[in-house]
Amino acid sequence: MSVFKAYDIRGTWPDQIDSDLARRIGRAYATFLGRGPIVVGRDMRASAPEIQGAFIDGVRDRGLDVIDAGLCSTPELYFAIGHLGAAGGVNVTASHNPAEYIGFKLCREEARPISADDGIRDIEALATAAEPPAAQAERGGLEQVDVLASYHDHVLRWADLSRPVRLASDAANGMAAHTFPGLLARLPRIEHHGLYYELDGSFPNHEANPLKKANLKDLIALVGETGAEVGAAFDGDADRCCFVDDRGRAVGNDIVTALVARDVLAGEPGAAIVYDLRSSWILPETILAAGGRPVRERVGHSFLKARMREYGAPFGGELSGHYYFRDNWFADNSEIILLSVLKLVTAADRPFSALLDELMPYHSTGEVNFRVEDKQAAIDRLRAHFADGRQDDLDGITIAFGEPGSSGWWWVNLRPSNTEPLLRMNLESDRREIMEQRAAEVIEVLGVEPE
């Protein structure tokens, strides 16, 4: 399986990605970008220093200057690109993947992502050619820069706490353990109770993937033990944040998007808010009710960021826990969304759970995965079975029956994963029995049990 993915480059070390390939990728990226300087950071994995060093050597081989940001969360890397006016940047990370993985998240100027459709395939061709791009006569320079304090200054622009607040968080031994303590030191109104704030790329406590409920159990217990008003779980490279409320419930990221969108629109009436098509119908309803313009987009950070730039949208969110901010170079940032939520919780006369309850009137399956040999055939079967529904092909297939505000409506989206050999289903209705009945019907049409 190729290490060149839809949104990044990722594989196991050292069998799939070693120093030789990293250097080739560095040369290929530099050739593709064509100018410097390039900011390069890395996460806390055991393989990251070696792979970062080889990648930097490859970039410098092609004559481009490199700014070495050292240990760096992905949001910190995005910030560094914009703040330093760099031509591009790369974080050497495998995000939430297990310890044996390593990879590269690639950007152009202003933290614009490079994906398969607009660069990764070109970089792959250059890196895997029999003769990779040759070294230039004049080698690029190297400068080491620590942007963490400036990054903290930037993120603190979103800090607006009306009163003291008790927060529980889980860094999962990932890069939030590098960035978040410095923010907390400058936010004395936060009483913080933290888990797993030791940088450890072996992830000794649990996977650094907060979308999996099993990885939230320690945080949920901590919320209960401490009486925390908000719980926050970070992923490995700290670009995602998932929430637990004061009652110990895992919160849907689309519901958090709706909550924050309402506040954003209070300050910017009529603005566009971009969201991914898996989100609950409560999200566009909330955006409209707040006087905003809901903009539905296919799944994937490169698509949402591009659409936000097109509309000048101040905010956007994905079901995966990525939240995007116009004033952060349209990039995702876990700490900015956490401060945005804490702002709302401290300003409210009700607990976090009560703020969420009014945004959760509907019933959803959540994302359900199916391992299917022929993905397109499965999508076509669903299309034919529900031929009388409203259908669109923005991402896989979405089929809807009824309208919000009516009784008995439901919708389903079935799409191929961009990162794994799976079909992913999301289904929602205003009535639980319809949600359960239609989910069973979809499973029957697919002819395979969910994973």
Image (cartoon, rainbow, N blue to C red):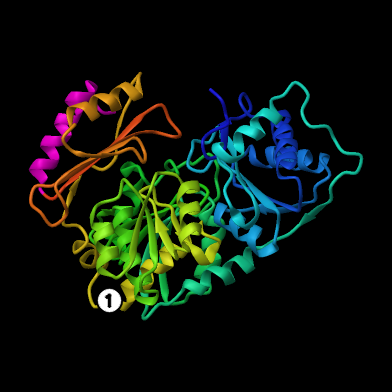
The foreground one among 167 and 288 is 288
Label 1 neighbour load within 10 Å: few <14, some 14-19, many 20+: few
Name the spot of residue 307 as percent of width and height, x first. 46, 54
**Viewed as shown, does residue 204 lie left or right of 422?**
right
Magenta: main secondary structure: helix
Residue at image coords 20%, 67%: 354
Name the spot of residue 118 as percent of width and height, x first. 58, 40
Residue 239 visible within the image: no
Q: Secondary structure at mark 1?
A: loop
**Viewed as shown, does residue 161 lie left or right of 81?**
left
Residue at the farthest bottom position: 162
Check if residue 448 falls in the magenta segment: yes
- The C terminus is located in which quarter? top left
Residue at the farthest right position: 137
Residue at image coords 28%, 25%: 380
Residue under label 1: 348
Residue at image coords 16%, 57%: 361
Residue 443, compared with residue 81, is above or below; it is above
Tell me which amino acid carries mark 1: Ala
Name the spot of residue 215 as percent of width and height, x first. 36, 44
**Viewed as shown, does residue 331 lie left or right of 215?**
right
Residue 295, compared with residue 228, is above or below; it is above
Residue 336 visible within the image: yes
Q: Dividing the picture into quarters, in which one does residue 428 lie?
A: top left
Q: Dividing the picture into quarters, in which one does residue 48 lie?
A: top right
Q: Dividing the picture into quarters, in which one does residue 438 lie?
A: top left
Name the spot of residue 183 as percent of width and height, x first. 52, 68
Check if residue 290 falls in the magenta segment: no
Residue at the farthest top position: 373
* Magenta stretch in the rendered image: 431-451
